[in-house]
Image (cartoon, rainbow, N blue to C red):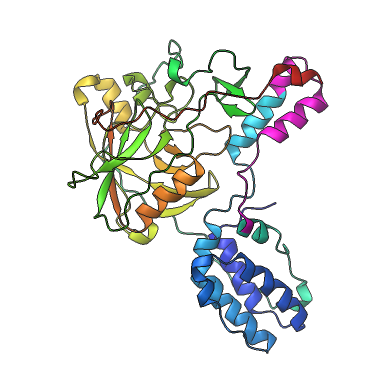
Amino acid sequence: MTIISCRTRRRTAATIARVHSPSALIASVLSLLLLAAVPAHSQQSPTLDTDPAAAAGQIADFFSKVGDEIYEDCIFELSPEQIEVQQALIRAYIAKGASSIVARRLAVQQIHPPKLSDRCEQIRRLPKTIPPDALSPPPSTKKPQIAAIPRIPVPKSSPHVNLASKKVLPQWDCAPGVDYVTIQHKGFPRKLTGGEICNPFEDVVHEIPPSSQTFRLGYTISTGRLFIVSDNPQLHGKTIAWAISGREVCRNNPDPDCLAARAVGPLPPGEYAFSGDKAHRVTWGPTIKRNVVGVYLKKLWDRNRFSPQQTAAILARGNIAIHERLKGEMSEACLGLEPKGWAYVASLIKDGRATGLDVYIDEPYPQVAENPPIVVASSFSLTSLFK
């Protein structure tokens, strides 16, 4: 299976547009494409020409109009981190006494891409290739553009941060009575139960009235709550969703050493901006193989909490984004949202309703904040390793 990126999408549409084979091939591909089209554009489906070449051209035009909406939520394969976790799970299960066959079977069953919607399944099942004799050479394509994220000036080097004495905060550790295995990922232990991290957030989304004005997003490091920052008192502080930030011992841990730890700690407190180019606020992240929203730090808050060395390390951090979290993954300084939460938050940013991000260490609006919707149960049992 392959990831269908912006590049693949454009190439597929352009390739289909150059087909000159019998109309049966065009018709079969067309039927799948139109079935996969999003409902919002169902009334915009083209009336097809009877000539195969003309019909293919209309398909390409239709694809260019709805392609982003068709593909942006379709993740067809494991992310690099999921592959690493899957391999680590195999080793952990074998260490617990499982056979190699059982260990591999469990790891494959537990670590997988998200369940695809019907329209994504239809896209995934499209023919991967079209017979070469039916095509003219495809046009050259460019890699999908990823907006450059400006950065504030930082010191040339940052000190090493020692996290050896840190422990996972109790609220993120496995609940009593839950079976788990421990893997090693990038030098840190990670507890997994059924292939999932312990105590993930439920995929809770509180939608905002469409008529609401623009606003900023707010995020609380210590709780994972994503909310509204607005001049409208009816909206201000209202929860939108929940997101993980930071991984292993630094998951949602506002300890200064964690905030200074690159690629481990949560995103630092402060004022963040999205790309100035609205069209590039949601872009393809080739490293993690999904769409992301890049954010950059404009102003660091709570400087009095940090030593000069910690401040230097915090300002040297980068590659901070908002994206979907897949099963078994954690977050490297980013905001990792569950699938529904990511889809909704990305739409707020893409449509220009959410204009920036403010990050707080502790909950700034406890009077309206709910308790984190944590999933504490698990059906995973260590005895399954020996069946």
Question: Percent from the top left, x then y, of residue 274?
Answer: 32, 49
- Is residue 64 visible to us here? yes
Question: Percent from the top left, x then y, of residue 150?
Answer: 31, 48
Question: Percent from the top left, x then y, of residue 361?
Answer: 28, 27
Front residue of this view, candidates 87 and 126: 126
Q: Main secondary structure of the magenta part?
A: helix
Instruction: Give the residues drawn in magenta, as a range.
Output: 91-118
Residue lying at 44% horizontally and 19% vertically, measured from the top left: 171
- Is residue 142 visible to us here? no
Q: Is residue 41 above or below residue 333?
A: below
In the displayed structure image, the side of residue 329 where residue 108 appears, left or right: right
**Magenta stretch containing residue 98, yes or no?**
yes
Residue lying at 46% horizontally and 19% vertically, measured from the top left: 249
In the displayed structure image, the side of residue 291 where residue 231 appears, left or right: left
Q: Is residue 211 above or below residue 250?
A: below
Q: Which of the 4 image quadrants contains residue 157?
A: top left
Residue lying at 75% horizontally and 21% vertically, measured from the top left: 384
Total tally of numbered discs in the picture: 0
**Magenta stretch containing residue 80, yes or no?**
no
In the displayed structure image, the side of residue 145 where residue 138 appears, left or right: right
Front residue of this view, candidates 72 and 43: 43
Q: If the image is split into quadrants, where does the C terminus sit?
A: top right
